[in-house]
Image: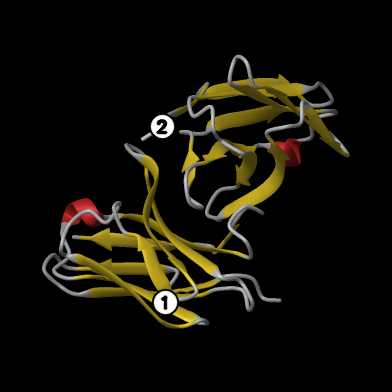
Amino acid sequence: GEDVEQSLFLSVREGDSSVINCTYTDSSSTYLYWYKQEPGAGLQLLTYIFSNMDMKQDQRLTVLLNKKDKHLSLRIADTQTGDSAIYFCAEKEYGNKLVFGAGTILRVKS
Amino acid sequence: DAGVIQSPRHEVTEMGQEVTLRCKPISGHDYLFWYRQTMMRGLELLIYFNNNVPIDDSGMPEDRFSAKMPNASFSTLKIQPSEPRDSAVYFCASSLTGSDGYTFGSGTRLTVV
């Protein structure tokens, strides 16, 4: 199957911006997603972007897509302690199957 | 809507026993997915259904695992016999179109001793 890769860990100070990066390999992916997982909970869909878009903004979240480099990023502005969680990047494969990265642990220091 | 509902939240069982995990998707969602999450392997898709029909079960580890969806509002994942390596968090998710992202349940943490 295709691989989705993410860095393992990111630590930021409260109030700073966080940027979580992801690379994917399936150039035919039509949708790419960001999910958030808090301890003991399921994954929560944060946002998704269609492959014909370069950028999508939703309040404090900005998604950037570079199709040429197969690179996806999630920027969280004014990061808060409540943003501490694991963030997963996912790509939609053939059919309706989502393939997830291993997740990036975001730690926000107050 | 109550979201995707999974039961039980936690299950501890002895090796060799049968385990049944349950899922109620969001009403009106045509797609249902079963994922398994472990530290070593991350999130793995086991099987998914569209309109109650299994579409892709290539992720089911072996014959010990089986999944059913007898109607649009209920699915089960069964492991028989269970083994310690099956210990993981099992998530059910549902989706309206398949492209609009999934809504996940809270998961079932399975421990096989």
Q: List the residue tagged with mark 2.
A: A2
Compared to residue B3, the image places residue B44 above or below, namely above
Q: Nearer the viewer, mark 1 or mark 2?
A: 2
How many neighbours does mark 2 have within 10 angstroms: few (below 14), some (14-19), or many (20 or more)?
few
Quarter of the image where one finds residue B86: bottom left
Three-letter amino acid code at the position of disc 2:
Glu
Q: Determine whether the residue tagged by mark 1 lies in a helix, strand or loop.
A: strand
Q: Nearer the viewer, residue B108 or A70?
A: A70
In the picture as drawn, the residue positioned furthest to the top comes out as: A69
Q: Which mark is residue B75?
A: 1
Return the x and y of residue B57 as percentages of the image width and height.
Answer: 31, 59
Above-or-below relation of B95 to B67 = above
Residue pictured at 71% horizontal, 45% vertical:
A46
SS class of the residue under badge 2?
Answer: loop
Please state, as top left, top right, bottom left or bottom right, where the C terminus of chain B lies in the image.
Answer: bottom left
Q: Identify which residue is drawn at 25% across, 73% down.
A: B19
Asked which quadrant contains residue A88, the reply is top right
Q: State left or right for residue A9 relative to residue B74.
A: right
| Quadrant (top left, top right, bottom left, bottom right) of the N terminus of chain B | bottom right
Crowd band around label 1 with a 10 angstrom C-alpha radius: few (<14), some (14–19), many (20+)? many
Which chain letter matches label 2?
A: A
